[in-house]
Amino acid sequence: TWAANVKNRQRAESSFDGAVLKFIRLKKEITLERASLLTQLSTSYISKLDNGLKPVSFQMRNQIMVGYGYSPTSFKNLS
């Protein structure tokens, strides 16, 4: 149905965003614990974002990117 397709698309989009954030975190060799300190988010929440279990809002993505040492505008095409 249409509703199921929309939900699946949203899940795929959030898992893509999470996968990209996880890739960036791992590329910079930042552990979940360090990421938590840098972003002021819990390790559990970051893990859920990384694995696409939680959606990544625009503001959340910017907060994480700044915590990882990037300018949010560096990844403006991420969404």
Image (spheres, rainbow, N blue to C red):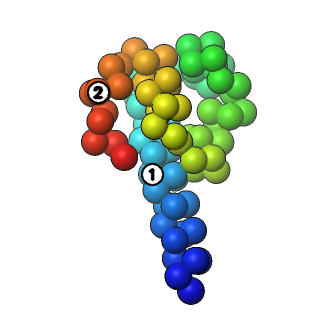
Label number found at residue 3: none
The reply, left or right, for residue 24 in relation to residue 60 is left
The residue positioned 51% from the left and 40% from the top of the image is 57
Q: State the residue lying farthest toward the bottom.
A: 1
Which one is in front in this view, the residue at disc 1 or the one at disc 2? 2
Does label 1 or label 2 sit earlier along the sequence? 1
x, y percent for residue 22: 49, 37
Choose between 77 and 30: the one closer to the eye: 77
On screen, 47 above or below 13?
A: above
Q: Is residue 51 visible?
A: no
x, y percent for residue 70: 35, 19
Mark 1: secondary structure: helix
The reply, left or right, for residue 15 in relation to residue 65 is right
What amino acid is at disc 1?
A: Phe
x, y percent for residue 67: 48, 17
The residue positioned 41% from the left and 31% from the top of the image is 24
How crowded is the residue under tag 1: few (<14 C-alpha within 10 Å), some, or many (20+)? many
Label number found at residue 16: 1
The residue positioned 29% from the left and 36% from the top of the image is 76
The residue positioned 27% from the left and 27% from the top of the image is 74
The reply, left or right, for residue 44 in relation to residue 30 is right
- Disc 2: which residue: 73
On screen, 57 above or below 36?
A: below
Q: CA distance from mark 1 to mark 2?
A: 18 Å
Q: Is residue 20 visible?
A: yes
How crowded is the residue under tag 2: few (<14 C-alpha within 10 Å), some, or many (20+)? few
Mark 2: secondary structure: helix
Q: Quadrant of the N terminus?
A: bottom right
What amino acid is at disc 2?
A: Thr
